[in-house]
Each structure stands twice: as C-alpha cells, then as structure tokens.
Amino acid sequence: MPAPLDLKAVLEELERTAPGASRVLLLAAATPGRRVVWPWVEGLVPDLTDDARAAVRHLLEVRGLVRDGADPPGATGTLGQEVAEAATPLLTDENATIDRYVIDRAEQVAEDQAGFPEPWEVDALLGVLSRPLGSNPGLVTQIPQFLRSVALAAPEDTRLRTILLDACIKLAGTGTRAEAEANARLADALHTTDPPTALTHYRRALEITRDLAEQHPNDPQLKRDTSVALNDVSRMLRDTDPTQALAHYRESLEITEFLAEHYRDDSGRIRLDLCIALRNVAEMLTPIDPEQALALYRRSLDVNTELADAWPHNLSLRHGLASSLNDIATLLSGTDPEQALGYYQRALGILRELAAAQPGNLQAAHDLAAALSNVTILLEHTDPEHALSLSKECLGLRRAAVAAHPGNIRAARDLAIALVQLGGITALSDPVRAAEHYLEALAIQQSIAEALPGSLRALWDLGTTSARLGELISPEHPEHRAMWRRAATSFRDALAIQPGHPGLARLSHLSARSYADCDPVDRDDWLAHAAALAQRFGFEE
C-alpha cells in the first residue's frame, strides 16, 4: 500500500527547489485515462534538475499514477482534481496559475496541431477549461483558435457547447470582445447541428464587433474583428441567402484592403487576411460573374505567392499558395480543363512537399489526399488509368489517417468520401467492386450519423452514398428500394435542419421521387413530399 503523502508539502517543496515543476503536475491532472506515462511527464519540463525530476516521479509513484513505457500519451494518465486544488494556493498570478497554464497549453496545442489537436489532449483541456472560463469568461478571447479547432473538428462534443453557452450567458450585455468571441465560438460548435442558432450567435458577435469598431475607429484589431465576424455570418448565408452573403463578404474585403493599405504588415497577417477575403468574394461571384471571380482569384494568388516567397520556410503560407492554385483550377475546370490541370498539378506538387515535411500530420495528409482527388476528377475521362491510380493513392492516405487517428470523425468522413470517389470511377468497368466501395463508405457514414445525431453534413453524406447505390444496383436487387428509402429519409431530415437550402431541397425532391418509383407502401406520402418541395422551390415535377 502506498505510503501516506502530504501532497501540499510536496508541492511546496517542489516550488522552492524547482520553480515550475508543479506545472507538470497541473497538465497531468487534466490528462484522461488511468496512469500517466513517465517519459511524457519527464519531457514536459526537460530542464528540471535531477532532484526535481525525482521528486515528481516519487509523487506520482506513491499515488499509483505513473507507469514506465514509451507509449504516446494518447491512452494515458489522470492525477485528479486534488492535485490542481492542492497546487492552486502555491501559484501566484505573477508566476503561473492553473488557469494560466491551461490557457497557455490550449494555445500551444492549437498551434502545434494545425487545427487537429490530439483527441486525448482535447479531452483533457476541455475537462479543465470549464473552471477558468466559468470564473472568468473573458479568458475565451485568449484561446479562440483552440476552441475553434475543437468546435469544427469535434462537433459532437457537448461539453464544449456547454462551456461556451455558460460564457455567453455570463458575458451577455457586456459588449466586450470576450462576449463577441464567446458567441462566435459557440456558433462554431453549433454550425452543423443547429444552423439557425449558430447564425444568431454569429450575428451577435458581428453586432458587438461593429459597435466596438465604431467606438474606436483607429483600432486596427477591432476592424479585423469585424472583418472576421462578417465572414462568419456570410458562411452561414452562402446557400440560403447568397445576395446577403456576398454583401457581407464585399464589406469584409473593403476592410482588409483598407488595413493592407494603411497599416504595416511585417508579419504578413493583413495580407493573409486579404487573400482570404479575395477568395471569399470570388467564390460567391463564380456562378454569376466568372470573369470577375477569376480576376479576384488571380489577385489572391499574387499575394499568396508574395507571402510564400517572403517566408519560404513557413509551411502555412505554402499551403495558402496551394489553395490559391486550387481555386483557379476549380474555376477553370469547366471551361479550360487543360489549364486547370496545370494549376491542380502545381498545387499537388506543393502539397506533396508539405506532407513529406510533416509526417504523421493529419491535416497535411488530408490536403494531399484532396489534391489527388482534384486531379483524379479532371483525368477520369481523359486518362482513366492515371485517374484510378491517383484515386487509390488518395484512398491509401485516407485509410492511414483513420488508422493513426481511430477516433477522429473527420478522418473517417474523408475515408468515406474517398471510397465513394473510387466507387464512381469503377462503376462502369467493375460495378460489383464499385458497390463494395459504396457499401464500405455507407457503413462509415451510418456510424458517423449515429455518433452525430442531427448533423447536417452527416445526413447529407449518408443520403448521397445511398442514392449512388440506388442508381448502381438493379431494381430487382433486394436492397434497391432500401437504398432509395435511406437516401430520401436522410435528405428529408437534413432539409429539416436547413430548410431554406435549395440544393438540399433538390436532392430531397429527386430522392423522394426515386423512392416513390420503387412502389413502396408509403408511396403517396413521398410523392406528396416531393410535390410540396416542387411548389415551394419552383422545381418541375
């Protein structure tokens, strides 16, 4: 049985002999699992003295909270809240409070993981963020990238939503940047499951940032905050109110152009914002004024090239350059596929370099796979063998990402998309194999939809793959009707989440008609559903 230990006394001694050693324990206190892997703890503060290292090891050992091994920290360790509570009075505001350490670590994780924090540490940090954000909601302004990354990558995490909702409630009416930030991050967490509520919070964030920018017209950061808030609202309106979305995007572009013209930009941040603003307006203009859209995309490419040349070792800027090349390629793909292919291949070359420079990075692998998919689409009819080879390479990357990150929803979704693409390529030459790809994708998408009930994206994916299977297999096949029913049901449920989406309404209409053509017992109900959509959105029956 472990010997009794005065935890407070040990921590006090640690702070006297090795200032900062307690911080090792503070993060460990937040770590999920049962036992912390010692090499990980040791590596957190590599400059500890031998005595301090031994003291930390002893503290963990006597409480049965440490084990040897070289495993990554993904499945390990918790010390418990008692460590954090015991350490709190020992740490001053000047050196490091628990709250400050958690905030710093969240910032570091967001930066290091490039938008994809490791699930184990996300879980750990979310578990302890509730306390500092509960007592000081204003801290939300210090960790926006971490919160945004989690909200977008893990929309199923209800704790995050609860934390941010509480922050919004406590900050309501303050009209501060903290209130705006809390509303924006809560909207991030809700944008796929509850778009109307997400839009409400994005609009509240915009309202606050506009007011603050008007009160302080010479503050460039508040101008930038307004630009970001405009982009958030626009993103939610793109499909349901494209006119308003374009107006907001144009306003955001005006702000970033003003900042780029009137303020020094030694870090490149303003010019990077300008690239994003140009791309946003261009994307909205593509269906209505492709010529102007192309001009804006080329401006964005010029700025991205300038940034990448100025900071050649900055991987993020190289990624931005690849994105600009992809934008132009996508616009040209319908009118000048040969030129588009050249841009796609340039982007692919950059993304291969970035993936090679970041082995094991999920985002880098994702981007490379997406680039392979883009080239595949253009080559599918002109060079089917090469297209098939690239599609298989893409699928291999997606499978590797799932193997490396088994609990990551986005990695699983990307794998399903790759399977669907490969199924589409092989549908004519090998329909049996294509059906196998579709069925594997469908199983993944079904599990995602069950894990994320009410997710618009999950339902959309499920409907799309079910419809592909319905088209592929013969009407005599016993699963033919079932596939069309799943497609119709998925699109109907997705439309209930985003009722004003015309593209989704079209898919719901077509799948309802296709299912009705299978002559099910509820045929009349689905025909009525299709007819109602046709009348509401102006579809031809």
Image: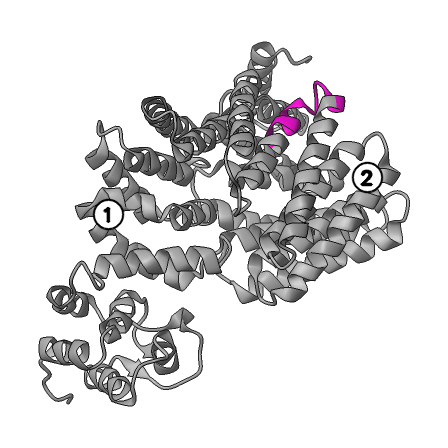
Q: Is residue 433 magenta?
A: no
What is the crowding at mark 2: few (fewer than 14 residues within 10 Å), some, or many (at least 20)? many
Left or right of 392, for residue 181:
left
- For the image, the number of numbered tags is 2
x and y, in percent, of residue 449 in the image: 49, 44
Query: Split into 4 quadrants, where in the image is the C terminus?
Result: top right
Q: Which picture quadrant has residue 514?
A: top right
Q: Please give the range of residues in magenta.
A: 280-291
Left or right of 482, for residue 177:
left
Q: Is residue 281 magenta?
A: yes
x and y, in percent, of residue 261 in the image: 56, 30
x and y, in percent, of residue 242 in the image: 57, 20
Q: Residue lying farthest right?
A: 382
Secondary structure under badge 2? helix
Q: Please, is residue 48 above or below residue 535 in the view?
A: below
Name the residue tied to disc 1.
Answer: 133
Residue under the point 15% across and 62% down: 92
Q: Are marks 2 and 1 in contact (CB under 8 Å)?
A: no
Identify residue type, mark 1. Leu
Residue under the point 29% across and 81% down: 66
Name the residue tied to disc 2.
Answer: 340
What is the crowding at mark 1: few (fewer than 14 residues within 10 Å), some, or many (at least 20)? some
